[in-house]
Image (cartoon, rainbow, N blue to C red):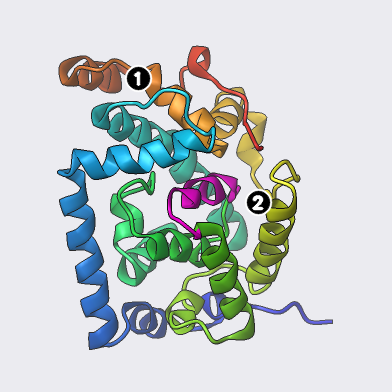
């Protein structure tokens, strides 16, 4: 039987770029989301409100500052997201540079806000649907800062599976595996029934043999692990900058264990 392949694996570069970019209406929506995200960064009260809602759900025991969140997200990006993506795409024969371009064209907010704390509800959901995630549980925990977030998450993944989602065409230009959304939907339903259910974890990560990468993956896999990492960082900008400049590998002393439920 011939293996099913996604549009991302079969279409030309030009077709993928045009599809991911979308039409004038879609582009205008993306620019509005970018503007809202940038404004939210200046709105400390709004961020505190979101953190408070997650605190009430037990995912946060102490709120980190905005600078700690920023530098924690940079560490998440460089120690897990980027190396894992390079490894995964290389094994699937997908060009890393083109794939990042497609992600930016489809939704630039997902690249400028890797933590999701500054993003709209639908931006977070779309981000999870556009990329085969290393582990989606962080986002399922995060989406609960919005009332009815999990309900809407499941609904939109259902739309992707049946082909009725408004962004189905642009997301199809990016997602790497054709069966991803069906697996994601199955996991979302299991998670809602039991938050401690085993998550779907992306295969083909040869980096897991590296203890530093494995520790970083465990730490940033769940929202409580990420928040605990951020809280362990310095609070002052100068100290954060100096630390970041001198840090060449994930600091094992700050490793956290994932908290699924």
Q: What is the x, y in percent for residue 31?
A: 20, 70
Q: Along the horizontal axis of the image, is 44 left or right of 127?
A: left
The dominant secondary structure in magenta is helix
* Residue 229 figure quarter: top left
The residue that appears at 18% across and 53% down in the rendered structure is 38
Q: Is residue 94 above or below residue 3?
A: above
The residue that appears at 56% across and 58% down in the rendered structure is 150
In the image, 90 versus 173, the foreground residue is 173
Q: Is residue 261 above or below residue 92?
A: above
Looking at the rendered image, the disc whose residue lies closer to the viewer, 2 or 1, is 2
* Residue 255 figure quarter: top right
Quarter holding the N terminus?
Answer: bottom right
The residue that appears at 29% across and 34% down in the rendered structure is 70
Residue extending farthest top: 253
Quarter holding the C terminus?
Answer: top right
State whether residue 89 appears in this view.
yes
* Magenta highlight on residue 147: yes
Highlighted range, magenta: 134-148
Q: What is the x, y in percent for residue 61?
A: 47, 24
In the image, 226 versus 252, the foreground residue is 226
* Residue 7 figure quarter: bottom right
The residue wearing badge 1 is 247
For the image, the number of numbered tags is 2
Residue 202 numbered mark, or none:
2
Distance (Cα) linking label 2 and label 1: 27 Å
Q: Secondary structure at mark 1?
A: loop
Q: What is the x, y in percent for residue 45?
A: 22, 40
Q: Quick one: label 2 or label 1, which is nearer the N terminus?
A: 2
In the image, 116 versus 72, the foreground residue is 116
Q: Along the horizontal axis of the image, is 115 left or right of 216?
A: left
């Amino acid at each position: 039987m011939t293996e099913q392949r996604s549009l991302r694996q079969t279409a030309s570069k030009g077709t993928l770029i045009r599809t991911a970019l979308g039409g004038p209406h879609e582009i205008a929506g993306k620019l509005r989301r970018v503007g809202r995200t940038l404004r939210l960064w200046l709105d400390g009260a709004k961020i505190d409100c979101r953190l408070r809602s997650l605190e009430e759900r037990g995912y946060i025991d102490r709120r980190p500052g905005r600078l700690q969140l920023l530098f924690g997200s940079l560490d998440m990006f460089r120690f897990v997201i980027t190396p894992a993506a390079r490894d995964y795409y290389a094994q699937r024969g997908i060009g890393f540079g083109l794939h990042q371009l497609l992600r930016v064209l489809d939704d630039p907010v997902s690249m400028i806000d890797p933590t999701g704390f500054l993003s709209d509800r639908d931006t977070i959901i779309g981000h999870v649907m556009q990329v085969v995630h290393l582990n989606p549980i962080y986002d399922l925990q995060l989406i609960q800062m919005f009332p009815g977030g999990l309900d809407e998450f499941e609904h939109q993944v259902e739309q992707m599976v049946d082909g009725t989602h408004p962004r189905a065409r642009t997301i199809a230009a990016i997602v790497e595996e054709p069966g991803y959304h069906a697996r994601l939907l199955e996991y979302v339903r299991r998670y809602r029934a039991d938050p401690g259910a085993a998550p779907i974890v992306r295969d083909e990560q040869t980096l897991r043999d590296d203890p530093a990468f494995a520790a970083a993956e465990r730490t940033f896999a769940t929202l409580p692990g990420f928040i605990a990492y951020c809280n362990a960082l310095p609070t002052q900008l100068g100290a954060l900058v100096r630390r970041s400049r001198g840090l060449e590998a994930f600091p094992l002393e700050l490793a956290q264990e994932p908290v699924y439920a």
